[in-house]
Image (cartoon, helix red, strand yellow):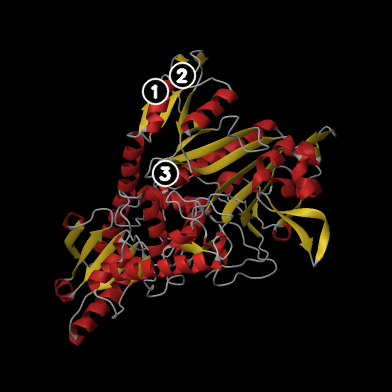
Amino acid sequence: MGALRLPSLAFLRSPSTATRPWTHFSSSSILSSHFPLRLRSIRRGCLASSSGGVSTQSLTKEEEQQQQAAASRKSAQMNQEGAVTPRSLDFNAWYLDVIASAELADYGPVRGTMVIRPYGYAIWEAIQVGTFAPPPSRLVGTVLLVGNTLREENLKLSFVLCALVYPQRLGNRLMENTWLVVLMFIPYSFIEKEASHVEGFSPELALVTIGGGKELEEKLVVRPTSETIVNHMFTQWIHSYRDLPLMINQWANVTRWEMRTKPFIRTLEFLWQEGHTAHATAEEAEKEALQMIDLYEKFAYDVAAIPVITGRKSKVETFAGASRTYTIEAMMGDRKALQAGTSHNLGQNFSRAFGTQFTDENGQRQLVWQTSWAISTRFIGGIIMTHGDDAGLMLPPRIAPIQVVIVPIWKTADDKTGVLDAVASIDQVLKTAGIKVKVDDSEQRTPGWKFNFWEMKFKGVPLRIEVGPRDVSNRTVVISRRDVPGKQGKEFGISMEPHVLESHVKRRLDDIQTSLLERATLFRDGNIVDVSSYEELKAAISEGKWARGPWSASDAEELKVKEETGATIRCFPFEQPEGQKKCLMTGKLADEVAIFAKSY
């Protein structure tokens, strides 16, 4: 893998469909030619899942052996049948089966932890690049690697500092990637400095009290987020207004001691992109926070094909230590909400606690204004739960590690030579055009098995190309779409001529991308109910839908809704209806409507 595996933030608007490159990195270095069908049920490790499963680590040795034996029998059955629980039958079981069958992740030896497997990590890499990296022609800066180099497996990055310049967004300023590796452990006193921060995170903290066989003088927190440690460093880096704005981004792992876990959605340790900025004025910080949530929104729509609702969190749901939190909220296939990304205006809360100051142009000492923002590997879970169907995984082309799988079909040795020559030519044409292609020319499996493996139940590849002896004779191919199963999604007689085939494949990938977004948007809009009273809200939530209605009630009444219905205010959407409104709870005037939903 190349050295640009961790891209720096581009802060660019997503390019249009017509100009967006269809590939960002080659999948050939990530994916082997064959993935074994070892479908051990990931459900056995899901702590307190809706299906009632518990971690094997909380069981006696005998009970654990019995459960492992049952899992082995289940594994053998799945290997034999290739079974994925239908989504329409049991959404939670379906989700876990998809993760196992697609080999996206597995459970680690510590309760609630997750090991991301190569195909799942390839999706995370696509999220990294699709969200933040500019097209190559826009890159005018340099990359500086300090310390250890990147390992091929991307399992460990010891210390990397990347500086990239993007003139369309940052002018002459630099946005720098950093990784605060030595700061994975945070002194507990740092967490305590910001009162609301420690109160909000206390239930999720993992503490280290012994090091080197001795009790530590001060207990250390395994980093749940980095606002405190960043401020400690900012106080050393910021002295004058000339040092501002200071903007850093890191791709890192964090730990939160979750009691109810679900792969990708909620685990003890996860990967994320985390940005922190410091500014001279409140206006600059607010502009930055809004710009970032806008970038996340565009990524969700344009790349992940997820139609999010963007807005401001309520005071109750605001990030601990922030003045305002902005969010993108996505509706999953079971109609629960997923907070897919957040951007926080921190005001001066942390700079006041840590004394992060600068000397302004008049020689006066001032506190900086700050923001932080992040998306995480939970976005992978969101993609699975938004687009998957009863058959299994379905990936939008712009996020898929493999966009096209080519399956050669032959019976005789003579047929094989001609077919593989044609396939090699097609593979080269599409890869040259920037399309991520996989050729499955293995001889251990039938074509039908390969169709099922790459498209339907396992890898979710958007487009399949079949090439057989007759196709070679006619100089044509057969193309099938993952999002349109059966004959309806098949096209016969597509010319092998390079410019014709390239154009057709790109057009179909665009069609699939658009179709998935439209399908998800229709599903979302069809499951949002406008309400004008608390009774209507409760009825909508009891039906599993989102409720949208005017709100100006108190924090206590918001908590009452959560207690009685299980729903929370997901956001006050930026897009608001015009006209006067009355609060659904109190009947008083309300300036805004809020969206309520049950969530992950």
Is disc 1 in contact with disc 3, using a CB cutoff of under 8 Å? no
Mark 1 nearby-residue class (10 Å; few <14, some 14–19, many ≥20): some
Circle 2 SS class: loop
Q: Amino acid at mark 2?
A: Leu
Compared to 349, does 210 lie above or below?
below
* Number of marks: 3
Q: Residue at x 46, y 19 (%)?
A: 584
Compared to 308, does 394 lie above or below?
below
| Nearest to the observer: residue 210 or residue 520 | 210
Q: Amino acid at mark 3?
A: Tyr
**Residue 449: percent from left, percent from top:** 26, 70
**Residue 130: percent from left, percent from top:** 47, 53
| Nearest to the observer: residue 439 or residue 484 | 484
Nearest to N terminus: mark 3 or mark 2: 3
Mark 2 nearby-residue class (10 Å; few <14, some 14–19, many ≥20): many
Give the foreground label among 1 and 2: 1
User: Can residue 164 be seen from the camera position used here?
Assistant: no
Is disc 1 in contact with disc 2, using a CB cutoff of under 8 Å? yes
Q: Amino acid at mark 1?
A: Glu
**Residue 134: percent from left, percent from top:** 51, 53
What residue is disc 2 on?
A: 584
Nearest to N terminus: mark 1 or mark 3: 3
| Nearest to the observer: residue 245 or residue 106 | 106
What residue is disc 3 on?
A: 301
Give the foreground label among 3 and 2: 2
Q: CA distance from mark 3 to mark 2?
A: 31 Å
The image quarter containing residue 405 is bottom left
Q: CA distance from mark 1 to mark 2?
A: 9 Å
Nearest to N terminus: mark 1 or mark 2: 1
What residue is disc 1 on?
A: 536
Horizontally, residue 415 falls left or right of residue 156, namely left
